[in-house]
């Protein structure tokens, strides 16, 4: 069987946590990758592994720049749209910026993909389901959202608008679109600065500080390793049956946040105690935040189409986070300097 011809992928948000891992994987598969990132939450150091590869092209710019997006989409074969205003802190503290960036950015990318006839993989989020915690949620589950005055639901609404826009272009104009709803993801290069709980707890344990647990710690989540998530995205990109469909992507291994903190302490051999903090104290009065009792993905649709399975357990994720937080993560060091951003 002849191997598929190398393609050129545009990855928006490609200097971010998940985007940089996807860029590495695409390069490893022989493709060319154009990364578009404004570095508002991404970091060029995340692309340290990829910099020596001449098939990587980095463009510093925004998905809100319609002219630039159109130029880049026109020069690529496929588009992966990961760029978004993300993180609990950003969403709570700057809900308007988060909302407009996500909706307008996606509109710009989708319209460019339509003009040039480029297949599009859109990264969405489990936030779509809102407060629906009735067991593992499948792609057909109802959305249950709180009040519009709560900033968290503005993010969920923005991502829902992104999905509606992309699916509308697919149904009415034939744009090849696949949507991946990403659940909690963790792994190397993830910053604790944007409310990512695994990295935050790991950093606190390594520093010997109390581990902060918001609320009562009974909230239940599932954490997938970033390499498993990237594997799922690659399978969706390569499968014609994924076009026009929506897929949950995440781990089915469930834990409470309190138990997660206890696991971090155990794996770190840390004397750190747990410190429970009310949401009102953690999120500026609590007006922009409302937590969820449970969020578990139903990945049956993804597994049945692609054969995907998560290859990492929660202990693997915690151990990697502790290594990363301790400065000993065995990944490549970032180069001392980077090439200037280029336009392609």
Image (tube, helix red, strand yellow):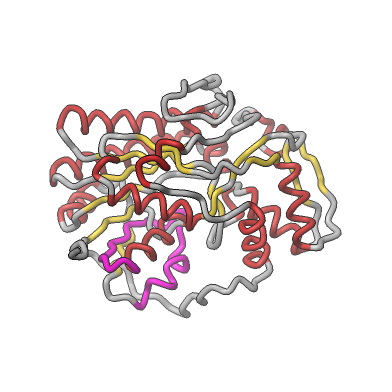
Q: Is residue 98 left or right of residue 151?
A: left
Q: Residue at x 26, y 50 (%)?
A: 79
Where does residue 158 sit, x and y in percent of width and height? 41, 32
Q: Please count the marks in the image.
A: 0
Where does residue 261 sit, x and y in percent of width and height? 74, 49
Picture quarter containing residue 37?
bottom left
Where does residue 85 sit, x and y in percent of width and height? 45, 44
Where does residue 99 sit, x and y in percent of width and height? 42, 34
* The C terminus, quarter of image: bottom left
Q: Is residue 180 left or right of residue 10?
A: right
Is any atom of residue 97 visible in this view? no
Q: Residue at x 59, y 30 (%)?
A: 288
**Residue farthest bottom in this picture:** 336
User: Which residue is more in the foreground, 102 or 304?
Assistant: 304
Q: Residue at x 19, y 63 (%)?
A: 1
Q: Is 335 placed above or below 308 here? A: below
Picture quarter containing residue 337?
bottom left
Q: From which residue to which does the magenta span run?
A: 28-52
């Amino acid at each position: 069987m002849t191997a598929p011809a190398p393609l050129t992928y545009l990855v928006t948000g490609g200097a971010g946590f998940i985007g940089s891992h996807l860029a590495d994987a695409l390069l490893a598969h022989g493709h060319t990758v154009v990364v578009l990132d404004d570095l508002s939450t991404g970091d060029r150091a995340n692309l340290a592994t990829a910099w020596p590869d001449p098939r990587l092209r980095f463009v510093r710019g925004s998905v809100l720049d319609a002219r630039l997006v159109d130029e880049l989409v026109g020069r690529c074969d496929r588009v992966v749209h990961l760029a978004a205003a993300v993180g609990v802190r950003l969403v709570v503290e700057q809900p308007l910026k988060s909302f407009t960036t996500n909706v307008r950015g996606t509109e710009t990318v989708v319209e460019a993909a339509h003009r040039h006839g480029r297949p599009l993989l859109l990264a969405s989020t489990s936030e779509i389901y809102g407060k629906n915690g009735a067991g593992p949620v499948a792609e057909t589950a109802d959305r249950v959202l709180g009040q519009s005055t709560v900033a968290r639901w503005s993010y969920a609404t923005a991502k829902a608008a992104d999905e509606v826009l992309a699916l509308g272009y697919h149904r009415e104009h034939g744009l090849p679109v696949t949507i991946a709803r990403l659940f909690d993801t963790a792994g190397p290069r993830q910053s604790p600065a944007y409310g990512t709980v695994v990295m935050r707890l790991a950093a606190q344990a390594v520093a010997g500080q109390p581990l902060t647990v918001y609320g009562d710690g009974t909230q239940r989540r599932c954490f997938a390793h970033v390499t498993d998530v990237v594997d799922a995205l690659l399978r969706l990109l390569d499968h014609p049956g994924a076009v026009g469909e929506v897929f949950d992507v995440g781990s089915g291994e469930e834990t409470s946040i309190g138990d997660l903190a206890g696991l971090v302490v155990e794996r770190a051999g840390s004397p750190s105690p747990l410190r429970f903090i009310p949401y009102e104290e953690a999120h500026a009065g609590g007006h922009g935040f409302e937590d969820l009792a449970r969020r578990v993905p139903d990945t049956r649709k993804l597994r049945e189409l692609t054969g995907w399975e998560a290859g990492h357990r929660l202990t693997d994720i915690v151990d990697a986070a502790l290594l990363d937080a301790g400065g000993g993560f065995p990944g490549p060091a970032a180069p001392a300097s980077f090439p200037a951003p280029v336009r392609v």
